[in-house]
Image (tube, rainbow, N blue to C red):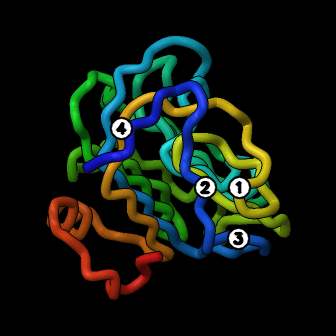
Amino acid sequence: GYLDFNGTNNYVAIRDLNYNTTGALPALTVEAWGRTSYVGGGYNGNWAIVDFDRSDFFNFYVRVDNGRVGFSTYSGGTHDMTGNQVVNDGQWHHLAVVYDGTDKIIYVDGQEDARVLNPHGGSALGRNRTRFGFLGDGSEASSFDGSRNNIYFEGQLTEVRLWEAARTELEIADHRTLRLDGNEYGLI
């Protein structure tokens, strides 16, 4: 099964996870199977796959101005990154973003799509502000199911995984179709 987001008013609030300190995330991997064909508007018109506030922690999304994966992170400033492969083609794609403590990497269908070298000077992600996350909408939430930006995702998502660890290209490629048992290192 999958979650079907209508782009109008549905989302998922993440209950048992929030970030609230500067440097809360020394490493991060977020992955999901996604399908969207949404086109048009500014880069942020289809937020988000997973968002813990672009300007406080991170945001993982598909840009609607060019159909590529977007990955925004905060550490002393916001860094926006865009992949190369168009993924808003109505087909299922395995999408993943990684911050390994130095570099930011985007993977599409198990292969590296884009990389930015050391955009945050090796610093961990996050600032001293509480943020809860969402699937299918942008977060401004300082409490569970709190404030959102009401820019809803249109498409389908399944197998959303959040890791407080950097997954390698081999791990992403090999494990994207495996069922997890929930005890994997760094899996939230």
Q: Would residue 145 be found to the left or right of residue 30 on screen?
A: right
Circles 2, 3 touching at the beta carbon (< 8 Å): no
Is label 3 in a helix, a strand or a loop?
strand
State the residue position of label 4.
Answer: 156
Q: Would residue 172 be found to the left or right of residue 19 on screen?
A: left
**Marked residue nearer the N-terminal end (2 or 3):** 2
Please tell me whether residue 69 is drawn above or below residue 118 in the rendered image. above
State the residue position of label 1.
Answer: 145
Decide if residue 23 is in sight here: yes
**Marked residue nearer the N-terminal end (1 or 2):** 2
Decide if residue 107 is in sight here: no
State the residue position of label 3.
Answer: 19
Give the numbered dot on residue 13: 2
Q: CA distance from mark 3 to mark 4?
A: 26 Å
Q: CA distance from mark 2 to mark 3?
A: 14 Å
Q: Would residue 108 be found to the left or right of residue 126 on screen?
A: left
Is label 4 in a helix, a strand or a loop?
strand
Circles 4, 2 touching at the beta carbon (< 8 Å): no
